[in-house]
Image (cartoon, rainbow, N blue to C red):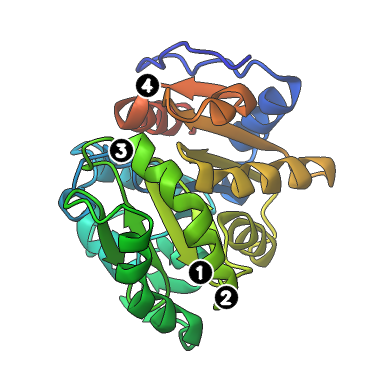
Amino acid sequence: MASHEDPTENALPAPTTAAGRDGLQAILTRPSRAVIALDFDGTLAPIVPDPEQARAHPEAVPALAALAPKVAAVAVITGRPAEVAVRYGGFAGVPGLEHLVVLGHYGAERWDAATGEVTAPAPHPGVAATRAELPGVLRRAGAADEGVWIEEKGGRAVAVHTRRAADPQAAFEALRTPLADLAAHHGLHLEPGRMVLELRPPGMDKGVALTEYVRDLTATSVLYAGDDLGDLPAYTAIDELRTNGTPGVLVCSGSEEVAELRTRADVVVDGPQGVVTFLRTLASHIR
């Protein structure tokens, strides 16, 4: 079971697994070869009813700017379009974050602070076809509730949110099967999250994005922090990296909604506030 101890300015929480302790020690011993990777929503930014109103925790950017110059790289890996995450995070033009990378759409897009540019392949054609059919699918599923709404993700994915519905969980469950069928019909994958169902091209997940990024940098240690079901592939990637000799740490931005992350994590912190405190504390321990 992961630690629920809150980090303080002077002490890092002790990971509760041997693998987690080895990962943290590797980061502290050789920070110049360490990658720090983080989810955005629920990890650096509090979860809010309207995702368009999400913004990074006010201490997130200062904490990242304190840590980034001391490690090999800091990457934000998110399901959002990269440009949106950069804007909502306030990551552009920040001293100390000159080499920050945002891997948007689960790695399909990449924003580099060094250039301010986003690079990405062409969108999957199934996304546009799926978006056109979604209103009808919602009606037939009895989920045309005004609180159930569709989020377009730059033509690279589309998501259906139920958090604002009269009964969010009932709407979520009612839509899982019809949306899975719709995704399969157009060659897409359905990814459930915290009161959200996302339809996106296969092969796009945070585990793939994290593994490729770590290998490109030939990093010798890695930390990943997340809060949602979409972060489980990144957790699995860390497990595989550890098995293959790259130490790593799994941090959960505590959520009662996703118990699986809490039980798999080496360290559990109290949401975005806990994450930024952990990052700031980690930076203070690296000389």
Identity, as a three-letter code, of the amino acid under mark 4: Asp
Q: Which residue is mark 4?
A: 270
Q: Earlier in the sequence, mark 3 or mark 2?
A: 3
Query: Residue 53: image x %, image y %?
Result: 15, 50
Is residue 113 visible to the viewer in this orientation of the structure? no
| Residue drawn at point x = 77 percent, y = 40 percent | 242
Q: Earlier in the sequence, mark 3 or mark 1?
A: 3
Is residue 202 visible to the viewer in this orientation of the structure? yes
Q: Do the CB atoms of the residues marked 2 and 1 lie less than 8 Å apart?
A: yes
Residues at marks 3 and 1, CA–CA distance in whole angstroms: 21 Å
Residues at marks 2 and 4, CA–CA distance in whole angstroms: 40 Å
Work out whether 262 lies above or below 166. Answer: above
The residue nearer to you, when weighing 88 against 98, is 88
Q: Do the CB atoms of the residues marked 3 and 2 lie less than 8 Å apart?
A: no
Q: Secondary structure at mark 3?
A: helix
Q: Quadrant of the N terminus?
A: top right
Classed neighbour count for the residue bearing mark 1: other residues with Cα under 10 Å, few (<14), some (14–19), many (≥20): many
Q: Which residue is mark 3?
A: 168
Numbered disc in front, either 3 or 4: 3
Query: Residue 39: image x %, image y %?
Result: 43, 47
